[in-house]
Image (tube, grey):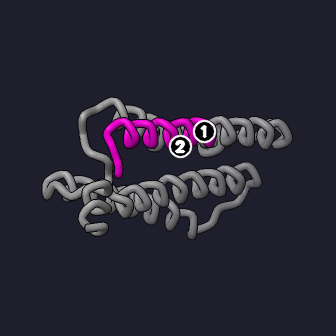
């Protein structure tokens, strides 16, 4: 059974994971730009911001609030959106530093935004209907 303390702890653990991802992205960015011969890309410089602002910060705020835990599908969509935007930012930064461009890079932004929007809408609907991940698990076990 899920309790409020368990949900809050789970969200805090996920928030810490996103902080670690942001740290790894900043280290990767710094190392990559060290060997880029003075060429910089804002997508690479701000690579850490995606998991920090879209992952760690919202989950930390959600763990401190009295709102319900998002359903599994909403969290999975949100996580996939963050991962897509992070990968797209990294790839865009690498290609900008290399001095080239690709029309396919826009797909990352569109797909990441669509996944984030789907996760947010899913969470909003679950809040309005009162169905969250913990509640659904309890009803399925009965």
Q: Is residue 43 magenta?
A: no
In which quadrant of the rendered view does residue 41 lie?
A: top right
Q: Position of residue 121 (x, y in %)?
A: 26, 58
Q: Residues within 10 Å of mark 2 (few under 14, many from 20)?
A: many
Q: Residue at x 24, y 40 (%)?
A: 67
Q: Give above or below for 122 relative to 63.
A: below
Image mark for residue 51? 2
Marks 2 and 1 in Cβ contact (< 8 Å) = yes
Say left or right for 32 vs 139: right
Magenta range is 1-21
Q: Position of residue 117 (x, y in %)?
A: 33, 58
Q: Residue at x 51, y 63 (%)?
A: 106
Element under disc 1:
helix
Say left or right for 65 vs 77: left
Element under disc 2:
helix
Image mark for residue 22? 1
Q: Give above or below for 103 relative to 40.
A: below
Front in this rendered view, residue 109 or 23: 23
Pick out the residue farthest to the left: 129
């Amino acid at each position: 059974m899920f309790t409020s303390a368990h949900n809050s702890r789970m969200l805090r653990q996920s928030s810490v994971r996103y902080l670690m991802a942001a740290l790894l992205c900043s280290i990767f960015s710094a190392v990559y730009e060290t060997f880029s011969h003075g060429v910089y890309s804002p997508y690479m410089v701000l690579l850490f911001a995606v998991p920090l602002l879209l992952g760690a910060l919202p989950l930390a705020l959600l763990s401190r609030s009295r709102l319900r835990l998002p359903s599994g599908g909403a969290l999975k969509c949100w996580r996939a959106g963050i991962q897509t935007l992070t990968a797209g930012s990294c790839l865009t930064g690498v290609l900008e530093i290399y001095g080239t461009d690709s029309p396919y890079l826009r797909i990352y932004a569109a797909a990441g935004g669509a996944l984030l929007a789907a996760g947010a809408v899913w969470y909003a609907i679950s809040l309005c209907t009162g169905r969250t991940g913990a509640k659904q698990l309890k009803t399925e076990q009965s």
